[in-house]
Image (tube, coloured by chain):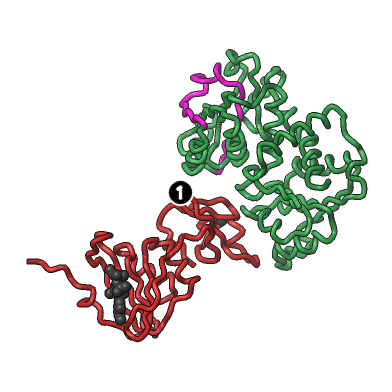
Chain colours: A green, B red
Amino acid sequence: MRHIISINEVSTGEIDDILDRASAIEEGDFDPDALKGKILANLFFEPSTRTQMSFVSAMLRLGGKVINLGSIEASSIVKGETLADTIRVVSGYADSIVLRHPKEGAARLASEFSDVPVINAGDGAGQHPSQTLLDLFTIRQSMPLDGINVGFLGDLRYGRTAHSLASALSRYGVTIHTITPPGLELPPSLTHDLLDTGTKIVVHEHLEDIIADLDVLYVTRIQRERFPDPGAYASVAHGYRVTPETLADVSERFILMHPLPRVDEIDPAVDTMPCAQYFKQARNGVPVRMAMLQKVLL
Amino acid sequence: MKRKPEEGLLISPIRNGTVIDHIDGGEGLSVLRILGITGRTTESLSVATNVESRQMGKKDIVKIENRELLKKEVDRISLIAPKASINIIREFQVREKIGVEIPSEVIGVIRCPNPGCISNANEPIQSSFACQKRGYRCRYCDTLITRDIASYII
Ligand SMILES: Nc1ncnc2c1ncn2[C@@H]1O[C@H](COP(=O)(O)OP(=O)(O)O)[C@@H](O)[C@H]1O
Ligand SMILES: [Mg+2]
Ligand SMILES: [Zn+2]
């Protein structure tokens, strides 16, 4: 039985396989009855419109059906049931479980109690492998992953999507460039892990110092809660905003990504530029999740 | 003039029990804590701290009367005293010598420092850490403990 809990446990061969399958799916090359008769249980203990909807869409496009938790208030969770018990019960109702939970490690726990494959759809500040796969997929649509220069802008301390993507990219011999406000740098343990793989990390103070050399710029949201007062947030956030002027000298194959939702970090005037790939990126969630569901269910 | 203190001068012999030797200097009390031995224990025990040792510079020694350590307890000791040797004493003689082994996995011994980790929630699981080059990594949330491991012991 194949769970997908952390991108770190998915081999490079498997990643390539999932991305190749997603490419084929995107071109319409898939069996719309591939998962006919299969039921997916969507267990979202935390709101997440996009991830939840794209898993539902992926399952329906492959001919499967979806059941879900309903409202948490009405469920046995409020009666104090453990996640372990919920998983034991639900794994008797479905052929696979997609789990989003506020606690780190929840999906690992679920995999220990489930009789059916578990896909982690985000566990607190932890892993979110389907996001990482769709990020890789989006880059691969524009260029091969090997040896590229990838910039990460914004909050690299708490931004889990950036963490997972950076560690996945470390398998492809990329160079990682970071541009962060003070205090929101990459956590030291992740920096060590990345350096251990031979990945080069270059820290830049300003985006304009490196933008012309980047193949990808991955923008993450800087959260207001990380700052003591609104003034401090506003002054920092302003310096990390991407505008058409910021992107004046980018390379031909350069792409701009963002896991969405975006707030102020990308000027809407950028949306129509050819390099702006974030809406495409969000759409890629469906073919990538279709490929993942096929991987665990077939 | 200074004569090296003989261990025997610091601690009198025991008839039956366990001697934990070659504990890193200053970690003797942590070893007791790992074994669940607190101030209210009924065991008769002695701790010698910062004894000079030819191999280790300074070392601690713990002697516990009338208790033979279990393998599980020995493994816990490896977390803070990887060089320790455990001597089981019967009738004043060393009858068994056990070296500690660093286990590849430490289960139910240390608490994950991440309050958001599922292993700290009310779930029917034990904490679980993989022993890695840079420290102990939580199986659930990937948090890496690199120092002061003794303070996370459950
Ligand atoms: N009967 C005893 N009572 C208390 N401590 C003892 C007793 N016998 C041995 N020890 C201690 O146990 C440790 C191991 O003893 P031994 O095997 O004789 O020496 P070593 O390991 O240094 O070669 C030493 O620290 C020694 O002082
Ligand atoms: Mg000796
Ligand atoms: Zn943990």
Ligand 1 placement by image quarter? bottom left
Please report the bounds of the magenta region as a residue range: A199-225
Looking at the picture, which amino acid does disc 1 mark?
Answer: Arg
Q: Nearer the viewer, residue A178 or A79?
A: A178
Residue A297, how many percent across, how many down? 82, 47
Structural crowding at the residue carrying mark 1, measured as other residues with C-alpha within 10 Å and reported as few (<14), some (14–19) or many (≥20): few
Q: What residue lies at 55% left-to-right and 16% top-to-bottom?
A: A212
Please check the rendered image and state whether residue A220 is part of the magenta-colored stretch, yes or no. yes
* Residue identified by numbered label 1: B134
Q: What residue lies at 50% left-to-right and 29% top-to-bottom?
A: A200
Residue A128, how many percent across, how many down? 67, 44
Q: Nearer the viewer, residue A285 or B75?
A: B75
Please check the rendered image and state whether residue A211 is part of the magenta-colored stretch, yes or no. yes
Q: What residue lies at 84% left-to-right and 55% top-to-bottom?
A: A94
State the image quarter where residue B126 is shown: bottom right
Residue B40, how many percent across, how many down? 39, 82
Q: In the displayed structure, would residue B115 be above or below residue A229?
A: below
Q: In the displayed structure, would residue A99 be above or below residue A226?
A: below
Please say whether residue B78 is visible from this viewpoint: yes
Please say whether residue B39 is visible from this viewpoint: no
Residue A177, how many percent across, how many down? 52, 28
Viewed as shown, does residue A141 lie left or right of B4?
A: right
Q: Nearer the viewer, residue B36 or A216?
A: B36
State the image quarter where residue B3 is shown: bottom left
